[in-house]
Structure formats: structure tokens, C-alpha cells
Amino acid sequence: MNKPVLFIIPGACAFGSQLTLEWVKEPYQVGLTTPEIRASSQFRAINPAGKVGALKDGHNVVGENLAILLYLADKYQDKGICPATGTQERARVYQWLSYLSSTLHPAFGQVNFPGRFVPSELSEVFKQMALERLFAVLNYMNDSFNEHGLLVMDKPTIVEAQAYGLLRWSKGFHGSAPVVDINDFPKIKQFLERMESDMAVKNALLIEAGNAESIKDSQFAGYFTFD
Ligand SMILES: N[C@@H](CCC(=O)N[C@@H](CS)C(=O)NCC(=O)O)C(=O)O
């Protein structure tokens, strides 16, 4: 297995890593996972946490989206997906990846899955509080876009890839109705539209949905399945 294989769930948080693989234009595969696959010993050997994203690249295995994104940034240093180490921009990449992973992702999770945190009788109260928290996080992000409509530089990086994969949940999570009105966050709305006009994003969305037949100018090398 020489090509990197990224394991995902359609619509979930590994999209940023998948988009990054699409941007670097080197052959890669995608493994669509189910709960059974994620529980398997083959998958757990790649990510013992049993979660996506999970990357197998030859003998290297990496779990956690933040780690996968930085692994790809190190591997594909000449592909323009991440600013150079030691720069202010690179420091911003670390800051944003940490914020996305530790704050934005859980803020959505608390709104979308209150049953994971409190018993059902407290679910509505918890969800309302979580929604207020999500609103504050989205406001902070909305105010953080620079004059280029991005978070780090004048062109998209691994941060924008991951930000897109999570912020798209503002428009609805796995087909459910949106929990916020995207018009309350105009810069996020603009950012989502800008990203969706990128051919690589269109390709990655088709691939994650299992509709790879109509992708264009992509190095996607097919869906991976365990033997
Ligand atoms: N901290 C982890 C979170 C990963 C995570 O929660 N992944 C979810 C999808 S968004 C998942 O794999 N859920 C499936 C499951 O729990 O079985 C990361 O950022 O990689």
C-alpha cells in the first residue's frame, strides 16, 4: 500500500485532511468507514481511538485531524498548503488548528449530540446553552477572517481546509436543519461560498459522498477496502 489512504465518514470532520490530499495532487485513496469498520482490529491498528480522520501512509499511521494535517504539511512542504516553520503565519496555523480541534469541533458536538453529555430530561436546557456557546465561537471566527477572506494568509492553507470541513456544519449537520442562521455570520458565509467554488473542494465533496465518477483534474486513486 504505497499511496496514502485517508479513512473518513461522509460529512464528518476528516474532510479538511481529504481536501488537503486533493490540493497536493499526488495519488491517494479514501476509505469510507462504518461503525463496524471503525471497530475492527485492522482499523484500530491505524487509529486505536476508533475515530476518523485516520491516515495510513506506507508504514506510517496517524490519527487525529490536527496531527494528520500537520503530517501532510511536513510531507508536502513544496505544495503551498502551509507556511514555512519559524514564521508568524506558521504559528497562526498551530493556533487555528488547535482552536478548530479543541473549541469549534466540540461546540458543534454539544449542540448536535446533547445526549452524550446529559440525561434526556436536561437535553433541551443543555442544547440551548450549547447553542449560545456555539454562537459565541462562530462570532469569534466570523470576526477573525482577514482582508483576503481567510484565516492565515492570502491563499488557503490546511487551516482553511479544516475550517471548511467543520464550518460547513453551520448549514446543517448530516442533512439535518441548520442550528444557526448562516446570515448572522456573513464572513463565514462568504468563506464557505468561496471554498465551494474551488474545484478541489467540489471533487472532495463528491468523493466523500461516494460519487467519484464526475471528479475532474484529481489524483484520487479509488476507494480503499480492507482485505
Ligand atoms: N479529536 C478527534 C475527533 C475525531 C472525531 O470525533 N471523529 C468523529 C467524526 S467527526 C468520529 O469518528 N465519529 C465516529 C464514531 O465516534 O464512531 C479529531 O479531531 O480527529
Image (tube, rainbow, N blue to C red):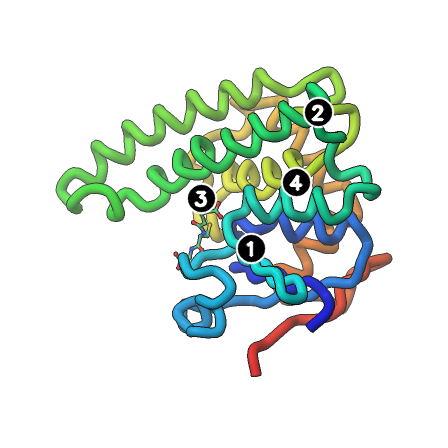
**Hey, what amino acid is under mark 1?**
Val
Residues at marks 3 and 1 touching, judged by CB atoms closer than 8 Å:
no
Q: Label 4: how many residues lie within 10 Å, few (<14), some (14-19) or many (20+)?
A: many
Observer-nearest of 146 and 157: 157
**Hey, what amino acid is under mark 4?**
Ala
Q: Quadrant of residue 80?
A: top right
Which dot, 1 or 2, sits closer to the camera? 2
Question: Which residue does the numbered mark 2 point to in the structure image?
Answer: 86
Label 4 vs 1, first from the N-terminus:
1
Q: CA distance from mark 1 to mark 2?
A: 23 Å
Question: Which residue does the numbered mark 1 point to in the structure image?
Answer: 62
Find numbered disc 3 in the image and state the secondary structure of the residue it sits on: loop
> Does residue 10 appear in the picture of this structure?
no
Q: CA distance from mark 3 to mark 2?
A: 42 Å
Task: Examine the rendered structure and indicate whether residue 205 appears above or below residue 124.
Answer: below
Q: Quadrant of residue 67?
A: top right
Q: Quadrant of residue 144?
A: top right
